[in-house]
Image (cartoon, rainbow, N blue to C red):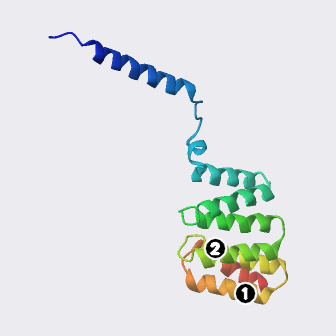
């Protein structure tokens, strides 16, 4: 076998040096987020949910809102919208809660959070002493989702309103 020529060896060494120089001159990127400029959807969602769980409702809403702006149609989007309504509900800001729950129903009609959103809307109406609207919503849940947990809760709530 022939020994490598000077030009081959020289090129290999220069390529290695160039590669080493390139990797050492760039700062390490801790997360992909820094490269793409877009946060990881699961991290953003989980961070918002953690804030909600800890009672930091305003910060949770801001993060869920950011999540929905960046990821309007993911498997978590209807949940994020629901939790925005829930954050208002927990603050006893029932009118705002009703509006956010309505967004779940309008934007994600096939989503699994629709019956929950309707139920929370009904509870919000009850808190606002609008039992007629609450009864209409509760009846709708029973009719649309007859075998669901939400329907069972709705039936019990209707009985308590009579």
Question: What residue appears at the point 73 percent right and 69 percent down from the top-left corner?
Answer: 85
| 90 relative position to 117: left or right | right
Q: Which label is found at residue 37?
A: none
Q: Which label is found at residue 104?
A: 2
In the displayed orientation, state which residue is furthest to the left: 1
User: Where is residue 88 shown, x and y percent of the image?
Assistant: 79, 67
Task: Specify the quadrant of the image occupied by residue 8.
Answer: top left
**In the picture, which quadrant includes the N terminus?**
top left
Compute the Cα span from label 1 to label 2: 20 Å
In the displayed orientation, state which residue is furthest to the front: 7
User: Where is residue 48 shown, x and y percent of the image?
Assistant: 69, 54
**Observer-nearest of 117 and 11:** 11
User: Where is residue 69 shown, x and y percent of the image?
Assistant: 64, 63
Question: Can residue 151 be seen?
Answer: no
Q: Nearer the viewer, mark 1 or mark 2?
A: 2
Q: Of helix, strand and loop, which one carries label 1?
A: helix
Q: Of helix, strand and loop, which one carries label 2?
A: helix
**In the picture, which quadrant includes the C terminus?**
bottom right
Question: What residue appears at the point 21 percent right and 9 percent down from the top-left corner?
Answer: 3
Q: Residues within 10 Å of mark 2 (few under 14, many from 20)?
A: many
Task: Specify the quadrant of the image occupied by residue 27.
Answer: top right
Q: Which label is found at residue 135?
A: 1
Tell me if residue 87 comes above or below residue 126 in the rendering.
above
Tell me if residue 140 comes above or below residue 75 in the rendering.
below
User: Where is residue 45 shown, x and y percent of the image?
Assistant: 63, 54
Q: Does the CB distance between marks 1 and 2 fall below 8 Å?
A: no
Which one is earlier in the sequence, the residue at label 1 or at label 2?
2
| 16 relative position to 120: left or right | left
**Observer-nearest of 136 and 63:** 63
Question: Can residue 87 be seen?
Answer: yes
Question: What residue appears at the point 74 percent right and 52 percent down from the top-left corner?
Answer: 51
């Amino acid at each position: 076998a022939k020994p490598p020529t000077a030009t081959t060896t020289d090129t290999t060494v220069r390529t290695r040096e160039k590669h080493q120089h390139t990797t050492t001159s760039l700062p390490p990127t801790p997360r992909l987020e820094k490269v793409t400029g877009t946060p990881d959807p699961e991290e953003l969602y989980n961070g918002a949910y953690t804030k909600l769980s800890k009672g930091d409702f305003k910060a949770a809403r801001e993060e869920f809102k950011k999540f929905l702006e960046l990821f309007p149609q993911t498997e978590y989007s209807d949940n994020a919208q629901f939790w925005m309504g829930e954050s208002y509900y927990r603050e006893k800001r029932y009118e705002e809660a009703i509006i956010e729950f309505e967004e779940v129903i309008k934007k994600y009609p096939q989503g699994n959070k629709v019956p929950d959103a309707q139920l929370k809307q009904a509870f919000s109406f009850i808190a606002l002493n609008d039992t007629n609207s609450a009864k209409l919503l509760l009846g709708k849940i029973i009719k649309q989702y007859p075998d669901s947990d939400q329907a069972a809760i709705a039936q019990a709530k209707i009985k308590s309103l009579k």
